[in-house]
Image: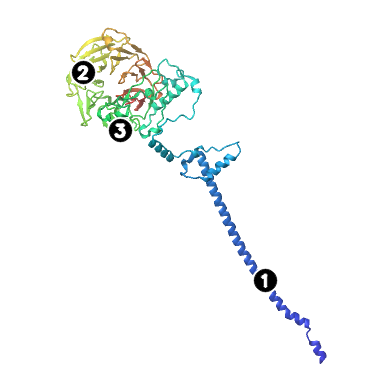
């Protein structure tokens, strides 16, 4: 029995091992749980560390952005001054920067003159304090830099065509560099007048020098009585002009002009233009042509708006002209009759057919300066005088040959005529008789006549292209030779025209392209820079009442508009 028990008994070590196995398992489980907890804690720590790192990076980025903004502001201050930054007081950073610059090496330095300059507001405050104290007077600013070579150099303004306009006298050639600069500035002011009323006096620059004065160059002088401030209250006590224009010399050689927008750009014509004329107010321009339409434009050189147009169904327009008083327009064509358009009442009246006359065409005419008489060119040398009021024939004048052109004198008491016999007739309009006949030198057939509105000059053109300029008093006294013979045209002279002050004479022929010449009357020389190439075949032209504008109609249906810079008013 004992042996059986001993054999079936379990060894103590085995029992201990069996009992110890679950304990170890428990221990391993606990250790694994601890490791899992430790791993979770490590993950949380890593997340917090990453967040801290991101925050630190953001803070660093923000600091770098702030530093960059500061550096940009400093650079702006260095370049543009304190005008672009608000006025601040007690800038420690700037003082530190200046201290660092002072302690740095002498190989370079930072220019902070713009940063140290007063701002606009500080200058106003300082100027107010100075004016209130009355200790300092306003001083004119000195130029920042003066070129010493200007006084040493000499420039010949007579050689270059573009610089001839800077001359004061015809024989002037060499001037100093400083005089050249001042004249260029004065010419720029003359060509580009600024709006001085919109600028304060502190911003107006004075370009005057000892050699030049822009006011003298422009011919503008302050009227007497207004040069001193104590007389400023007298401005309303008189109607005297505040600014007097003493016109500069009108020199020959080159004509100062510029082309503007076409006068009929708002309503161009498809037919040749036969007549253009300015109204006495210098703003209204009439345009007539073979399209049987009379157009009116308001000329300003920029828009040139169309005001009105009149269509004449049975009359292609050969000539249209304002009465000198500006109340009516006389319109004629190759018909037995003509038209009178009343601008005030907008009414069209017919003139003719004239009683007792058999003329088939009344296309050419001239109006007397007093707006009382119209002189139509008739057949067989007859000049038909028609009253502007009654529109009836009141008299006739008879030439020996055919009549081609007529022109009234500026006082309206005499009439000049020329035609197929090569002679110039003078008629007394009071007695309606011829009191002088003179031969036009070298002329076979006279084609055009024009008297000057100022003085005693008249010009006569012929079919050979020659234009003779006479002094009327000398011509009536027996002197038959002209003052000047102009031979710049080679075809028939269709019209001649003086401007308002008789300083420019225009001659033209419609038979050749660009055959419009402008003559400087005081010297009787042709302007070398005229005509431009865009004229086409000129058919008619006119100067504005004060000479500022010049309109030219051509066969292409355009009315070219030019500005003459010598004249300040249209």
Quick one: 314 or 321, which is closer to the camera?
321
Mark 2 vs mark 1: in front: 1
Can you give x and y, in whole percent of width and height, for residue 28 in the image? 69, 73
Can you give x and y, in whole percent of width and height, for residue 509 in the image? 34, 19
Q: Secondary structure at mark 3?
A: strand
For label 2, the crowd category at 10 Å Cα-Cα, with few meaning under 14, some 14 to 19 and many 20 or more, is: many
Q: Return the residue at label 3.
A: 306
* Label at residue 32: 1
Q: Are marks 1 and 3 in contact (CB under 8 Å)?
A: no
Residue 427 visible in this rendered orientation of the protein: yes
Q: Return the residue at label 2.
A: 384
Residue 201 in which image quadrant: top left
| Left or right of residue 387: residue 193 | right
For label 3, the crowd category at 10 Å Cα-Cα, with few meaning under 14, some 14 to 19 and many 20 or more, is: some
Mark 1 vs 3, N-terminal side: 1
Residue 286 visible in this rendered orientation of the protein: no
403 shown above or below 326: above
């Amino acid at each position: 029995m004992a042996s059986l028990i001993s054999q079936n008994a379990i060894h103590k070590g085995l029992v201990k091992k069996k009992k110890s196995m679950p304990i170890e398992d428990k221990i391993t489980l606990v250790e694994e749980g601890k490791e899992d907890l430790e791993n979770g804690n490590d993950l949380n720590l890593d997340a917090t560390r990453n967040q801290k790192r991101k925050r630190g990076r953001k803070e660093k980025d923000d600091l770098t952005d702030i530093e960059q903004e500061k550096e940009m502001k400093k650079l702006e201050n260095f370049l543009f001054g304190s005008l672009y930054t608000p006025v601040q007081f007690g800038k420690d950073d700037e003082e530190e920067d200046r201290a660092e610059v002072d302690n740095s090496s002498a190989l370079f330095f930072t220019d902070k003159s713009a940063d140290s300059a007063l701002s606009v507001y500080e200058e106003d405050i300082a100027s107010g304090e100075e004016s209130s104290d009355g200790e300092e007077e306003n001083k004119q600013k000195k130029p920042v830099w003066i070129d010493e070579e200007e006084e040493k150099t000499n420039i010949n303004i007579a050689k270059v065509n573009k610089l001839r306009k800077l001359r004061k006298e015809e024989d002037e050639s060499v001037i100093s560099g400083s005089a050249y600069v001042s004249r260029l500035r004065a010419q720029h002011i003359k060509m580009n007048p600024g709006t001085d009323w919109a600028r304060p006096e502190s911003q107006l620059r004075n370009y005057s020098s000892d050699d030049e004065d822009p006011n003298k160059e422009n011919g503008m002088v302050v009227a007497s009585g207004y040069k001193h401030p104590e007389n400023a209250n007298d401005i309303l006590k008189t109607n005297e002009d505040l600014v007097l224009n003493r016109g500069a010399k009108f020199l020959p050689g080159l004509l100062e002009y510029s082309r503007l927008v076409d006068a009929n750009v708002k309503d161009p014509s498809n037919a040749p233009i036969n007549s253009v004329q300015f109204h006495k107010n210098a703003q209204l321009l009439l345009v007539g042509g073979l399209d049987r339409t009379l157009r009116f434009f308001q000329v300003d050189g920029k828009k040139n708006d169309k005001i009105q147009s009149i269509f004449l169904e049975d009359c292609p327009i050969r000539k249209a002209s304002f009465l000198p008083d500006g109340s009516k327009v006389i319109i004629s064509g190759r018909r037995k009759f003509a038209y009178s358009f009343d601008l005030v009442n907008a009414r069209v009246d017919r003139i003719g057919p004239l009683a007792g006359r058999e003329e088939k065409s009344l296309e050419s005419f001239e109006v007397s300066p007093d707006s009382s008489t119209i002189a139509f060119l008739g057949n067989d040398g007859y000049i038909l005088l028609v009253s502007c009021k009654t529109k009836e024939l009141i008299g006739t004048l008879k030439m020996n040959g055919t009549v081609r052109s007529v022109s009234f004198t500026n006082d309206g008491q005499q009439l000049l005529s020329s035609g197929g016999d090569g002679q110039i007739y003078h008629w007394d309009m009071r007695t309606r008789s011829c009191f002088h006949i003179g031969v036009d030198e070298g002329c076979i057939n006279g084609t055009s006549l024009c008297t000057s509105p100022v003085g005693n000059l008249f010009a006569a053109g012929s079919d050979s292209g020659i234009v003779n300029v006479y002094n009327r008093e000398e011509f009536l006294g027996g002197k038959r030779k002209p003052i000047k013979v102009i031979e710049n045209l080679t075809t028939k002279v269709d019209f001649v025209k003086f401007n308002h002050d008789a300083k420019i004479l225009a001659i033209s022929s419609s038979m050749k392209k660009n055959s419009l010449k402008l003559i400087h009357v005081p010297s009787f020389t042709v302007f070398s820079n005229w005509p431009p190439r865009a004229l086409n075949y000129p058919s008619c032209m006119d100067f504005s009442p004060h000479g500022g504008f010049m309109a030219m109609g051509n066969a292409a249906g355009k009315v070219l508009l030019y500005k003459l810079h010598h004249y300040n008013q249209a």
